[in-house]
């Protein structure tokens, strides 16, 4: 199993522009302290390379890439009310996208069965030409596009279990039938998109699955949507690579949303996804998105990685183990 990180992730700090901003470097420090205590769960740690400009251009127009670069080079500043780029943010965002690409390359190359990118800023709200929602470049989308354009895959499945709709990824692949995008998210919160009726556009109709859930939704609903709707549809799609936009803000302690998952709920979703992916013969790579209660985030990442990395774990034993959580 492969874990990707980079020191530049700690140098992007939206609190420079927005005091008290929840998307802060301490998120990664909390994750890494919890993993270090557990000897990194036996995962191999790799440094995330910077994405090349060509990689970013797979999903973003040149004007967007240059606008972020130039803003950071000139010292940084606010992009919208909750999105900020500082002097070091361009480099951090390059490594966040580059780590996702390196992970996809390693997984497709057969180096490992699962991977996790603990990098920031997050990416799934970044639209082709617009940074928003704490996100500058859409890392998971860049990796999916790279897997098709450079690694020769024909079908990539992106599962977005962040509590917010992954509007950026949805827009990037809205018209494509080679990337299946499925998002489970809380209805009525940021960014407001992701209605169930929106199933994609043009040739991409049927390749977008939006599953909004009400505030207060618990593990049973999330897991049943995954088991009964998302994974069966993904199975028909026969993906060659599974990427998870892994946000952990559906945790009951998260300050930004009102769902009620536990750390073990994410482990359960990871186990189900990994078991399905194994049936499809596809590796699974997770990319960190949201998650803003530091303790809940760290515990949820540990649970996810433990279950993604557990070679011998059956679905039944994991369900039994997490059932009381
Ligand atoms: Zn989120």
Image: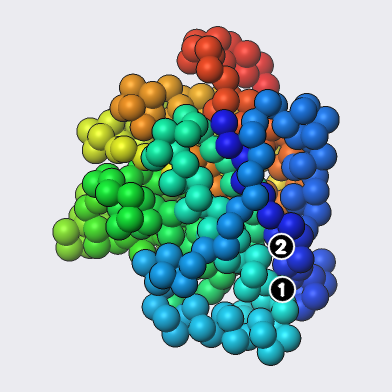
Question: Could you say where residue 155 lies in the image, as x and y percent from the top left?
Answer: 27, 45
Drawn side of residue 172 relative to residue 23, left or right: left
Which residue in the protein does label 2 denote?
8
**Circle count:** 2
Is residue 10 positioned above or below 302 on the image? below
Q: Residue at x 53, y 58 (%)?
A: 98
> In the picture provided, is 289 more to the left or to the right than 38?
left
| Residue 322 in view here | yes
| In this picture, residue 295 sits left or right of residue 263 | right
Residue 297, picture quadrant: top right
Alpha carbon distance from label 1 to label 2: 7 Å
Q: Secondary structure at mark 1?
A: loop
Mark 2 CB within 8 Å of ligand 1: no
Q: State the image coordinates of residue 134 (x, y, percent, origin top left).
A: 62, 66
In the image, is the residue at mark 1 within 8 Å of ligand 1 by its beta carbon? no
Any part of residue 284 in sight: no
- Of callouts 1 and 2, the N-terminal one: 2
Q: Secondary structure at mark 2?
A: helix
Residue reaching furthest to the left: 203
Quadrant the C terminus occupies: top right
The percent position of residue 43, horizontal first and vertical second, equals 65, 31
Do tag 1 and tag 2 residues touch (Cβ < 8 Å)?
yes
Quadrant in the rendering for residue 248? top right
Q: Nearer the viewer, residue 25 or 198?
A: 25
Dot 1 alpha-carbon crowd within 10 angstroms: few under 14, some 14 to 19, many 20 or more: some
Q: Residue at x 45, y 46 (%)?
A: 104
**Residue for point 65% across, 50% down:** 47
Residue annotated with mark 1: 88
Pinpoint residue 253: horizontal percent, then vertical percent. 73, 42
**In this rendering, would 229 be left or right of 245?**
left
The label number, if any, that marks residue 222 in the structure image: none
């Amino acid at each position: 199993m492969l874990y990707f990180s980079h020191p530049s992730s700690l140098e992007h700090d939206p609190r420079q522009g927005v005091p008290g901003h929840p998307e802060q470097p301490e998120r990664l420090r909390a994750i890494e302290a919890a993993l270090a205590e557990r000897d990194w769960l036996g995962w191999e740690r790799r440094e995330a390379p910077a994405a090349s400009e060509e990689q970013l251009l797979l999903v973003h127009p040149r004007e967007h890439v240059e606008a972020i670069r130039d803003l950071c080079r000139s010292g940084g500043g606010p992009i919208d009310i909750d999105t900020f780029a500082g002097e070091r943010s361009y480099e951090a965002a390059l490594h966040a996208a580059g780590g996702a690409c390196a992970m996809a390359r390693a997984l497709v190359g057969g180096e490992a069965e699962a991977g996790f990118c603990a990098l920031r800023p997050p990416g799934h709200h970044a639209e082709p030409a617009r940074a928003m929602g704490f996100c500058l470049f859409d890392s998971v989308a860049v990796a999916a596009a790279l897997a098709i354009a450079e690694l020769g895959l024909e079908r990539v499945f992106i599962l977005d279990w962040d509590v917010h709709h992954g509007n950026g990824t949805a827009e990037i692949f809205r018209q494509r039938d080679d990337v299946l995008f499925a998002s489970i998210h809380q209805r009525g919160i940021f960014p407001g998109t992701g209605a169930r009726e929106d199933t994609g556009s043009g040739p991409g109709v049927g390749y977008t699955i939006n599953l909004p859930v009400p505030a207060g939704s618990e593990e049973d609903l999330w897991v049943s949507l995954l088991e009964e709707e998302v994974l069966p549809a993904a199975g028909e799609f026969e993906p060659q690579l599974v990427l998870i936009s892994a946000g952990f803000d559906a945790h009951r302690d998260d300050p930004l949303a009102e769902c009620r998952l536990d750390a073990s709920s994410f482990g359960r979703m990871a186990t189900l996804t990994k078991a399905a992916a194994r049936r499809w013969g596809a590796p699974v790579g997770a990319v960190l998105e949201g998650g803003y209660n530091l303790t809940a985030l760290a515990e949820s990442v540990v649970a996810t990685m433990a279950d993604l990395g557990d070679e011998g774990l059956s679905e039944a034993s994991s369900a039994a183990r997490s059932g009381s959580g």
